[in-house]
Amino acid sequence: MSDRREFRDLAEPHEAHEAIASLELTPEPESVPLREARGRVLAERVDAGMDVPGFDRASMDGYAVRARDTFGADEADPATLDLVGAVHAGSEPTVTVEPGTCAEISTGAVVPDGADAVVMVERTTETTGEDGADAIEVRTSVAPGDHVMFAGADIAAGGRALGPGTEITPREIGLLSALGVDEVPVRGRPTVGIVSTGDELVRPGGDLHSERGQIYDVNSYTIAAGVEEAGGEAVLYPHAGDDYDEMERLLVEASEECDLVLSSGSTSASAVDVIYRVIEDRGELLLHGVSVKPGKPMLIGRLTDSAYVGLPGYPVSALTIFRTFVAPAIRRAAGLPDPATATATGRMAVEERYSEGRMRLMPAGLVEDAAGETLVYPVDKGSGATTSLVEADGVVVVDPDTEYLAAGEEVEVQLFSPEVRAPALFAVGEDDPALSRLLDRVERPRYLPVGSREGLRRLRDGVPDAAVVAGEPGRDPVARPDPLGDAGTEPAEVVGEWHREWGLIVPAGNPDDVTGLADLVDRDLRFVNRDSNAGLRTALSTALGDLADERGTTRREATEAVDGFDRAVRAHESPARRVLAGDADVGLGLRATAARLDTGFVSLGTQPVRVYANPSRVGKPGVAALREAVADGADVFGSLAGYER
Amino acid sequence: MSDRREFRDLAEPHEAHEAIASLELTPEPESVPLREARGRVLAERVDAGMDVPGFDRASMDGYAVRARDTFGADEADPATLDLVGAVHAGSEPTVTVEPGTCAEISTGAVVPDGADAVVMVERTTETTGEDGADAIEVRTSVAPGDHVMFAGADIAAGGRALGPGTEITPREIGLLSALGVDEVPVRGRPTVGIVSTGDELVRPGGDLHSERGQIYDVNSYTIAAGVEEAGGEAVLYPHAGDDYDEMERLLVEASEECDLVLSSGSTSASAVDVIYRVIEDRGELLLHGVSVKPGKPMLIGRLTDSAYVGLPGYPVSALTIFRTFVAPAIRRAAGLPDPATATATGRMAVEERYSEGRMRLMPAGLVEDAAGETLVYPVDKGSGATTSLVEADGVVVVDPDTEYLAAGEEVEVQLFSPEVRAPALFAVGEDDPALSRLLDRVERPRYLPVGSREGLRRLRDGVPDAAVVAGEPGRDPVARPDPLGDAGTEPAEVVGEWHREWGLIVPAGNPDDVTGLADLVDRDLRFVNRDSNAGLRTALSTALGDLADERGTTRREATEAVDGFDRAVRAHESPARRVLAGDADVGLGLRATAARLDTGFVSLGTQPVRVYANPSRVGKPGVAALREAVADGADVFGSLAGYER
């Protein structure tokens, strides 16, 4: 253990930015077909190689005339011109407009020789000339150039059309089309090799052996998507274990093929040490460790011919460090402008304290209060959690000197993208399969399945819009209408309610012949419970208390007699899955779960599930949408065994 | 001409939105690999199919212990535990932690049976037990669960991971990766067929015959890029002429292969009539013409099995109508959220009047004034211009009842994208090849080559930051420091100056043996001039005046003696190109142009080119950047014949 490396002398964030900026990422320019040029960046100035339009062009349907012939004409005294022919768009004129004559012309056609203006068809009348031939009465006078777009009037040959560094949007594609440019000189996209390390990683879709500690590789695809979002091209390499030779071979291969190599994946100090040694042996380490949380263990250096950045292993840390330090460098290398400022200003809904002297990139969620003001709350599920990737809306940058952010303090949230908005509904509480389906009918909901008890606590604090509670709450739920105000709490309002049947999950066929709660207490059955925030567990505890009362014992004695009462798992299906896996004989669960997973079920009762809304947010569209989803949810409740409204 | 169709009973914009919304565009959902899922939209809810993590996982490097064995341990009184083995990430534990023992464990490894917590390595010391075997001193007490992430703690099997309608960003890819999902159910992308009509169109890259009135097809690639930006898939069809059978065949083919067919291209009423008949014969026309400018001639309907929208032919109109009415429908069909609100608020720099009772979508440019406030000016180069696509930053929606926007009035500009910002430099004036190169060294410049005279006029009004003027201005240039203030004008400041040699462009070898200005006046040579805004023309007029003085005649007599004095073309290279094409014997131009195009040249003198800045904006970074580019531009001036600073 003695060679495990500690991070000392952490670099400041600005030093990390500078170190990355000192690496040469910029790829060679290339040429792409116009059809594929959207989103690319011009590598050089494009001058017009031709006049646009390339000829004097009629911009109206009408008649090509010599303007002088119409001078003085008006409704009362039209000029009559002999019609000598017609010119259509896409054809070469076969007529010349001599004095006293005109030619029919359609929009976009070449103005024929002799003519210097076009009269709109609406200001003319077909007639017959003195000689019986076709003629046109012109009831207005026009000036030379009227309704004519002269050659080069849009842009002339040799003119500057677009400058280097211009990002190509549909509008630039329009101008390049007009110039006939079909191959566009663009900045190259930096290629970014991604090497995930860690013997425990399995690529999504592969077979996972959890008993061996395998997990799916989160960082490879996540960082690859981030690279592409930033304008780079991601190249995925196979996983590297912690073996020096394998790591060296992969990293060097990637560095020879790419402009930038990113490693990520393993969080163990030993893997980081191996990478560290590879970089020192085959390249140059510029920076080791940066004073930012999350993300401390970051490496920056060069590896053979390419740039190298080592990202932390935990997904939230890896993506945060990538976004903060690496994505801007990729954008610059691709020639892309800084992304649109995407920030939201809001007030902290709770106090948050910081103990360490590092810059914090605090993941934060947004919620709109009753007044439409934005509240900001920290999202911190621990560095290993991947769900926090989608439970946050952005990041608050907290200065190293900041000891705490007070509730009510204004903060700026750097949104993950300009499209991010506060969810329409922010609810918390019980994990329930009917609710999961009902939420599908609410646009942009956020639901944190923290359990009924924790849900009630958070509702009281006034941050979420609503809490979903299974079972009878001990006391009437309340919520602070304004989490930052002094007004105290008010009773929460029930905006939806249904009932679900709960009981004991047993293997299919009920091999142990479990008939009820007494079996759990009296027999030697391995039980799996839910955690203490779950409404299901509250129901079980209450039922065990009733049983104890009947028997003249205490609830504590009853729960202690259950083998596994404290073996708590997290979600509504978890106990059933333990039973299915043979790890337990009995689990706490729902009839709906037993039906879905084809297990046996011993009913112990039904319990209500209620949606309690903060009274100040009952009118919020997301809350109204959930209320409506419950009211209209007969199909959902009908499709789940043991459910009714 | 009698069957040319007039648009009457124009629909209101909201009716056009409703008509498009009534068309069924939504494609079937599909499944895509996770690696390619970025930017797509989930078609259905994704529940966790497994626990994440799938096992009780160590979240620190250290020792797996039974928490109870550490109770009471501290620095002064450590607990000593026998070391029974090690567990590494990615391996199945081979040890069990019995009371009084521990196992080395690395971050991410499976917590072995018996253990319920992990002690950080930093709080331990390697030692030797009483029996001489390896042991570990634990200098802290831990609680059950410390530094352990329990199975399912991130998300548990059966839990709701992501809801339908979620847009897939790197963060969602992270969560899906953690769940091992490698095929993602996503909303289909609507396929949009694009049929450009018009016999005059040539696809960019093809051979263009301007004499036949051919132009490059702007709309196909532009609208295709817009379709892809909105989340659709564009399919380009060959050009259709105005022939009914061909148009019908192409439109029907497109409608059978796509969810939506867009036609665009021809602006002539006859082509519109043909399309109109095809839609009426083979589908249903819901709406014909909408009361908006630009864009009146818009069609909405159904065609065999698909939706159909006919866009106007002019590129600016086509793209504006596409963005306003069609792109939102494509986004909805793809399940994408409305794009981020991208607006800028500014004050009108000039008055703009509106005559027609139609909603105006006024293309507008942005410029920042000395105080950093945003000024808005209309961009209107006529409906046929493609350069206005890139000279505007967004659109101001002007109500049909609005007769004018006053200078100083606050307006909201709908930006073309959230990335759009006011250019760093907004300059106007002479068309000059050195300037064109110098602008490459300024970030985000906008330059409108309106000529020296018009440039001076606009500088005076105070809208642009600077004007580039060739030749000696008649009087000292001035600018309003605040275009909306009452303070009047102040002298403009020269921030850059260089000189260029000008004269007469003649064919290579000077076949007519032109020696000077007198030849133009005295001989029968076909001349091509520049327009009256060009500083080159002013120089020529002055020189002709001097010649007339010498001869005792008037300047007017001199100019009238030049055959083609009024034949004015637009850009600095245009006269030379006419000479090269054999359309003229002599053209007005620069020595640099003659050198570049390998023509002959008869020098008539040199003229200064000066950058005059609005005195209030001299400190603006873009103005400073141009000043610096001129100061550092020795290489540019050195590379252009006849230039010096």
Image: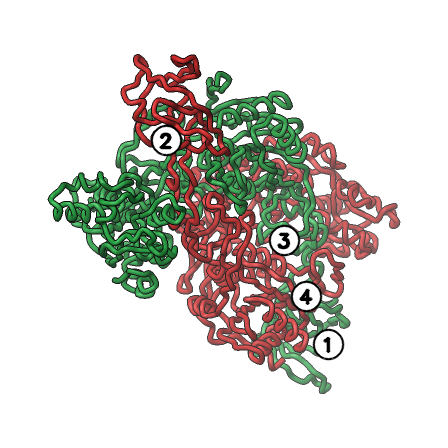
Chain colours: A red, B green
Indicate the quadrant where residue A547 lies. Answer: top right
Q: Are marks 1 and 3 in contact (CB under 8 Å)?
A: no
Amino acid marked by disc 1:
Gly
Q: Are marks 3 and 2 in contact (CB under 8 Å)?
A: no
Classify mark 4: helix, strand or loop: loop
Amino acid marked by disc 4:
Pro
Name the residue at 75% across, 68% down. B92
Circles 4 and 3 on the same chain: no
Cα–Cα span, label 1 and label 4? 30 Å
Circles 1 and 2 on the same chain: no
Graded by Cα atoms within 10 Å as few (under 14), some (14 to 19) or many (20 or more), the crowding at tag 2 reads some
Classify mark 2: helix, strand or loop: loop
- Per the image, the residue denoted by label 3 is B175
Cα–Cα span, label 4 and label 3? 20 Å
Chain letter belonging to callout 2:
A
Circles 3 and 2 on the same chain: no
Classify mark 3: helix, strand or loop: helix
Circles 2 and 4 on the same chain: yes
Quarter of the figure that contains the C terminus of chain B? bottom left
- Per the image, the residue denoted by label 4 is A238
Amino acid marked by disc 3:
Leu
Amino acid marked by disc 2:
Gly
Front-most of A42 and A50? Answer: A50
Cα–Cα span, label 2 and label 4? 72 Å
Which mark is drawn over residue A114?
2
- Per the image, the residue denoted by label 1 is B85
Q: Is residue A241 positioned above or below A79 on the image?
A: below
Cα–Cα span, label 1 and label 3? 33 Å
